[in-house]
Image (cartoon, rainbow, N blue to C red):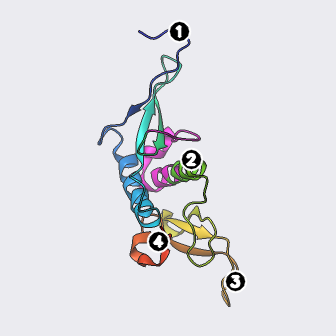
């Protein structure tokens, strides 16, 4: 039995509990595997609310159960585009804060990329780096599709 002020215990979310977030996390884990191949896949972790009538909060955590930042927006489960945006934001915050590095990096500029919504509600990795003859910032790849670009984006071990 928990004491009144003991923090709630987190638990690993089982596959299928949050199917849309599972799909989104699978895409992010593809990008993680390509950019940080030495890392194990990210996971969803649930933490019961401190309020009895409130739903649990779900976080994106490293394989060891550590996470950083905010929980996933419960409303983001309405569709894959919003789920992917919420999971990408949380995954990026967890990876960057716990590993103390920008993630993912643009292979052309070495800058950290950020998720941005593009056409047809697709989410892309966006880089602020300048491209010759094409203006400044650029879209690098769809979130979950860094593996389609080949091995040029792998970081040296």
**Few, some or many C-alpha atoms within 10 Å of disc 4 (few <14, some 14-19, many ≥20)?**
some
Q: Earlier in the sequence, mark 3 or mark 4?
A: 3
How far from the left and from the top, in percent, is residue 20?
37, 48
Residue 98: image tag: 2
The residue to which callout 4 is attached is: 154
Quarter of the rendering containing residue 104: bottom right
**Which element carries disc 1, helix, strand or loop?**
loop
Q: Nearer the viewer, mark 3 or mark 4?
A: 4
Q: Which residues are magenta?
A: 65-87
Q: Which callout, 1 or 2, points at the residue further toward the start of the chain?
A: 1
> Circles 3 and 1: CB distance less than 8 Å?
no
Compare marks 3 and 1 and give the one earlier in the sequence: 1
Mark pair 1, 2: CA separation: 30 Å
Question: What residue does disc 1 label?
Answer: 4
Q: Indicate the quadrant where residue 16 lies.
A: top left
When the figure is inspected, residue 133 is found, relative to residue 93, above or below; the finding is below
Q: Mark 3 falls on what kind of element? A: loop
Real-space Cα separation, disc 3 to disc 2, in angstroms: 33 Å
Count the marks: 4
- Left or right of 14: which side holds 151? right
Q: Residue furthest bottom?
A: 133
Circle 2 crowding by C-alpha within 10 Å: few under 14, some 14–19, many from 20: some
Q: Is residue 82 magenta?
A: yes
Of helix, strand and loop, which one carries label 2? helix
Percent coordinates x, y for residue 18 in the rendering: 36, 41
Tell me, yes or no, whether the two marked residues, 1 and 2, touch with CB atoms within 8 Å: no
Residue, disc 3: 135
**Residue plotted at (47% across, 67% down):** 157
């Amino acid at each position: 039995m928990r004491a009144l002020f003991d923090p709630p215990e987190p638990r690993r979310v089982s596959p299928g509990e949050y199917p849309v977030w599972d799909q989104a996390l699978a895409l992010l884990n593809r990008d993680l595997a390509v950019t940080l191949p030495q890392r194990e896949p990210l996971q969803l972790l649930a933490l019961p609310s401190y309020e009895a009538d409130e739903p649990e909060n779900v976080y994106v955590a490293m394989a060891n159960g550590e996470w950083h930042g905010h929980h996933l927006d419960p409303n983001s489960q309405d569709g894959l585009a919003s789920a992917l945006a919420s999971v990408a934001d949380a995954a990026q915050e967890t990876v960057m804060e716990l590993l103390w590095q920008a993630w993912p990096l643009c292979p052309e500029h070495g800058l950290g990329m950020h998720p941005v919504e593009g056409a047809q509600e697709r989410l892309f990795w966006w880089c602020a780096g300048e491209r010759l003859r094409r203006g400044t910032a650029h879209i690098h790849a769809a979130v979950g599709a860094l593996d389609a670009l080949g091995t040029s984006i792998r970081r040296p071990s």
